Every structure is written in C-alpha cells, then in structure tokens.
Image: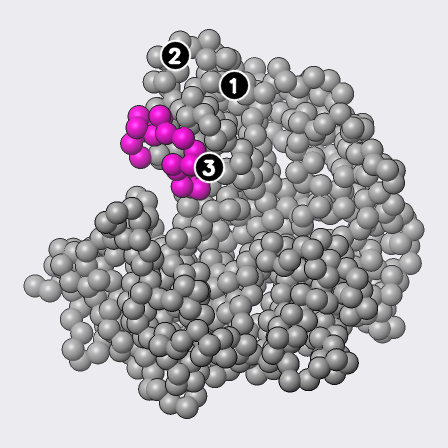
Amino acid sequence: MLHETETPNTLLELDDYRVGFRTERGLAKAVDGVSYELHSGKTLAIVGESGSGKTVLNRGIMGLLGSNVNESGSVKFQGEELVNSDRQKFWGKKMAMIFQDPMTSLNPVMKVGKQVSEPLRLHQGMSRKEARHRTVELFTLVGIPEPSKRFDEYPHQLSGGMRQRVMISIALAIEPDLLIADEPTTSLDVTVQKYILDLLVEVQKESNMAMTIITHDLGVARGRADEILVMYGGRVMEHAPAETLFNEMAHPYTSALLSSIPKLDDPKHTRLTPIEGFPPDIVDGPDGCKFAARCQYAQENCLNELPDTTVKGDHSYACFYPIGTDEGAKAFASNAERGHTAAGLKIRAKEEVI
Amino acid sequence: MAGSGNNHLRENTDDTLLRVENLVVEFPSGRRNKVHAVSDISFDIMEGETLGIVGESGCGKSTTAKAIIQLPKPTAGKVEYQGTNLTELDKEGMRQQRPSIQMIYQDPISSLNPRRTVFNIVNEGTRVWSTEHGAAQEQKVDEMIEAVGLDPREARTRRPHEYSGGQCQRISVARALVLDPKVIICDEPVSSLDVSVQARILNMLQDMKDEYKLTLLFISHDLSVVKNVSDRVAVMYLGKICEIGDGDLIYEKPTHPYTRLLLAAIPDPKNKHKDITDILEGELPSPLNPPSGCRFRTRCPRATEKCAAEEPEFRQIGNDDHWVACHFPHIEDDDLGPNDEISWPPDRQE
C-alpha cells in the first residue's frame, strides 16, 4: 500500500473495551474489558465458543452495533479514538469486514459485479468502466473462473465458495489497512476453506494489511495466525503467539476447549472430554472468574475474585491457578482429593468421563 | 464410471445388517437432463458397526442416507436390510420396517415440530407403534428422555424453542431411540453445534450405541469427527465412493488422490498429510453431466487418458480392509497384489 510508511506500527489498540446491551433484565455485558494490540501485517485469531463475545467485539470495533449499546473503554485505530464516534468514514478504505454467511450477506437482487464495483466508484471515484475493469481483476485475484461472465451474475447463480470469494473481493477492493474476517470459512468444505485461507494470507503479504480472523476452529487459528486470543464470557482468557499458546498453554479453559475436539491423530473411538456445564449468564454473571463454574482447577477465591492478567513477555493469561505452575498443580490436586471443585463440579478420574 | 465393482463388499452373512448394492439415485432436471446424485455405489454394514461417510457438499452423502429409508425410492439398486430388499417392498411392507431404521437430522431445531411439547415429539412413534398403552408407554418415553440427559417432567410442558441446540439434538436422539431401532442414520448430527457441545453429543451417541446395541451410518463433512466415531470409513466424490475400509488405515495411508487432498486440506499444522502439495484444480463438475471414466479425473493431479476412458474398479490394498477405486493409487510396491500394475508415474512402466 502507498501510505505504508506513514502507518504507525500499532494499527489497533484496545484498552479495557466494553460493550453492553441494554435489556429488560439489565445490562448484558457481551464484551467485558478486552485489551490487545494489533500490528500492521500481522494476523490475530480470536477463538471461543458461541456466545463468548468474539463477534460482538469486532462488530463493536467496526461500529456496526445498534443504538441500544453501551460502549466504554478505548479503541484506538491509527491513533484515533473510535469508541462513541462515527466510524463510517473508515469503512472500506481503512477497515473492512467479511461476514460469516456468504448466502445472506450479499444482496440477492443485485449483480455480484455491481456489489463489488460499488465501493470502488463510491470511495475511489472510478468511472463505471474503470470499476468494472478493476472488479474483473479482483475476481481473477480471488480465483473466480470466467470473471467477466460472473460479473453479470446474481448471487444465487454461484456456489457457496464462489460467493465467499465475492465477499472477499468486496473487502479487498479498497485495500483496507485492517480486515476483520468473521468465521470466513465456517460454512465451506475443507478444500475450499484451504483455498480461501491461503488467498487471504497471500493478499495480506502483498498489502501488509492487518487481519483479525474470528473462528472456533483451533486448527485454523494455529495454522494461519501469528497470535491467538482466547475469549470466554466476554473476557480475554489467554493471549499468546500461536505456537506458544499450544506449547505453553496456561489457562484451563484453553486446555478444556482443545481437549473437546476430536483429533486426527487419535485412534478411532477415542473418548472425547467435553466441557461440563454451560456458558455464564452475561447479564447477571459470576463475580469471580467467568470460567470458574466449569473449571477443574477452581478454588474458593476463583468464585469471588476476578483474576488479574499475568503477563510473561508476549504471553498473557487471566488465571489464579494456571496449568504448568505449582499453584495450578496444587489446586488440581486438592480438588481431586476432595472429589469436586470449589464450585461443586465433580472431578472425574482420568478414564471415567461422563 | 469412477469406482465400480463390488469387490469391496464382504461376504453376505447373518451379521450383515445392511447391504447396499449398485445404488443409483437420479433426479429429473429440465426436459431431458438428469442429476446423477448417486451413481452405482455399494457398501455393507455389519451388526454393531459404524460406517462413516465423508465427502464435500454435493457428493451425495445425504441422498444415499435418504435412499436407504426409501425417501425417495432409489432409481436402481438394492437396499437389503436383514435380508429383505427394501426397494421391492410395498407401502405397508416398508411401513413395518421403518421403526427399526431411524434417522437423526442435521438441523436440530428445524427438525422438531415447534408447536408440540417435547414429550409429544418423542411419544409420537410409540403412540403409533407401541404394543403397550397408557402409563407403561409413557413411562418408556420418560425413561428415554432421561437417558439422553433431559428432565422428563420439563419435557411434558416445554417446546423445542425452550431448549438449546445441543439439547434439541438430544431430543432427536431420544425420538429415534424410543422405538428400539437397530440402525440409526445420522446425517451431520453435530455440524451445527459448538465444539464442547459436539463432544457431549458424540460421547452420548457412543454410549447409546453400546447400551442399545445400535448400528450407525454416520455422515459428516468433518474428517476428524468421522474418524473418531467410525469403524469403517467411505470417502465419496460426486456420487461415487472412491475409497472405503478401516478408518485408521485410510487416515494413516490414504491411497486415492482425492482422499489425500481432502486430508491435506485439514487446517492443523500438526496434520501429517500437510506436506502433500498437489493442488485440487478447478471446481466440482456438475452432477448433470459428470465426467466420463473416473469422475475425479478433471481435478486429479495423476489423471491420464486411461482415466477418461475406463472407470476404475475397486481393488484391495495388501490384505487389509482397505479398498480404492483408482487406476493410479498411491501405493507402495510391497502392498501391490500380483495382478496390479503400477503405472504411476507413467514412465515407470518402460
């Protein structure tokens, strides 16, 4: 990109960012104090179960939430404060978003070519002819066969993978500095998923844009991201460079999430370890650690106190009894001895899983 | 066509619960065209076994499942269940068989009637079929709801929207199991669920299978899930089976070029197949006009003229339960049979 040199290295900086929805029962704290930094040219993956606040967080950054939200804290994008300000001027040019469902996020009664060329004409003042030319170029870039024929087709004439490629070409049309991809490949087959992810990484290398990938697939996160942020109940549980997260996993939630997924290396009929219990209520949630009720390590103080974030170099986590420390080992041993955690969750012996 | 022959079928014994032979499902499209959804596939499932079917969307997995329960009746081929050919049964004959072959669908919420209570949903089958009536029948329904981990008292008054996706999938399982079926066909039962819920449902299916001695046909596009639940795995592409056999063998040493590409695409850096650099070219061909010979040839890195002219037959790899339909599979020389020619790369023949 042309203005690459003047872009500060830290593109996005969140400090204690909170998003609450006003509901009849009170404020639903969907994002509850999130802080992180994202640098140009880097990819951050945000993982977590549904309802962990990952989508709301990013829609909040983009300014796409409705009017009944309470935003607080700080989000600085290229040094400019975004919270409670109009972010529409950034859309397209500075930041763009790819949505999860390519079936519903394209306009069904508008030709796909027009949907891609619209931002080009709007933001870059291209003529109709120039915009068409550039759109065909973009279609070629994202691997759409017969791009000039596809220009005049409607979304229903394209397959799911093709529609997602159209979405990506819309997001890339103006070469944004920040691209947020919300589950960009969840509804796609593995072979198409691989193509789309490779494509995003390739485009990123060329343009030095920063990317946030929201996903629930830890494999995608590990393979494509520089850093991984694990969210639960609207809070950051653990944040580390991708390989560090897997090799020096500290938070019990990260570990629980990983062990609930069937792994390709395991022999058939390997028993899975689900996470017991349910995600916390975000309106009237627990005072202490959000994960305490489902955590095998939970002690009495986890239920009442919110753990501070421990920072060790580029690895940070919010837990009193992290895995791989003496405190963690002791907490687990004492829970195993009494047969349940402080929250009353039964500790299962290694082989006996419910 | 790709993957013909029935060499891979095992001997038809008393243990063979379900045997599908040369199943063809075609749908008319327009005046003269036909969608070749499933073309001449065969497989068998022994009692107590789990067969997993994997493949990308549009490969005919769900059509195969529906053809087994005759919804709709397949265009050609045989579906033998405990020795009875289901395709030849009349309406009443098929109705008598239905309780023993049950299905669990993909979307847990839309496959339950939103206007009925959960108790009524689970009770429906027993109301029609049960020999017991009144309290004994209702007790059975309550027990089944409890067995899948839900509260039977709540189920009397609650409707599906009051339950989460995972709980709705449990209700589907209860509805399927209450009639004491022998076979459960699971069509993507966990693909709309969160990972932690998915683990619970998969564990529950395994428990139910052990407890009620079930035989499962498990369909999914998620290769890790299929590997976990299945004894045998069949890989489908464009209405054909390309590779079938023991799950561990197929995942350890995939021999069909398509299976290899599928496994290589799994986004896990520890994936041992990630070094496979072959690229899956192009798009899935239209099932209206599938390629001649091997259906995968248009996208296959190994395809030659032979692949266009001749459809490969299933061949066994070594002496294992591992079968592949490919002219040029990725086999090491030790695993070749006496009649196998190794002809890849083509110049090795000379």
Q: Residue at x 44, y 79 (%)?
A: B93
Q: What stretch is highlighted in magenta?
A: A145-165
> Looking at the image, which residue is at 37% across and 56% down?
B59
Residue B317 part of the magenta segment? no
Element assignment for label 2: helix
Chain under numbered label 3: A
Residue A128 numbered tag = 2
* SS at badge 1: helix
From this viewpoint, is residue B60 visible? yes
Predominant secondary structure in magenta? helix
Do discs 1 and 3 share a chain? Answer: yes
Is the residue A8 above or below the residue B156 in the image?
above
| Left or right: B349, with A33 as reference point | left
**Residue shown at the point (74%, 34%) measured from the top left:** A35
Disc 1 vs disc 3: which is toward the camera? Answer: 3
What is the three-letter code of the residue carrying label 2? Arg
Element at badge 3? helix
Residue B114 screen position, x and y as percent? 67, 55
Check disc 1 and give the amino acid type: Glu
- Nearest to N terminus: mark 3 or mark 2: 2
In space, the residues marked 1 and 3 are separated at their CA atoms by 27 Å
For disc 1, the marked residue is A4
Tag 1: Cα neighbours inside 10 Å, few (<14), some, or many (≥20)? few
Please name the residue that numbered disc 3 is placed on: A164
Instruction: Spot the residue most to the bottom.
Output: B14
| Mark number, residue A258 | none
Quote the CA–CA distance across marks 1 and 2: 28 Å
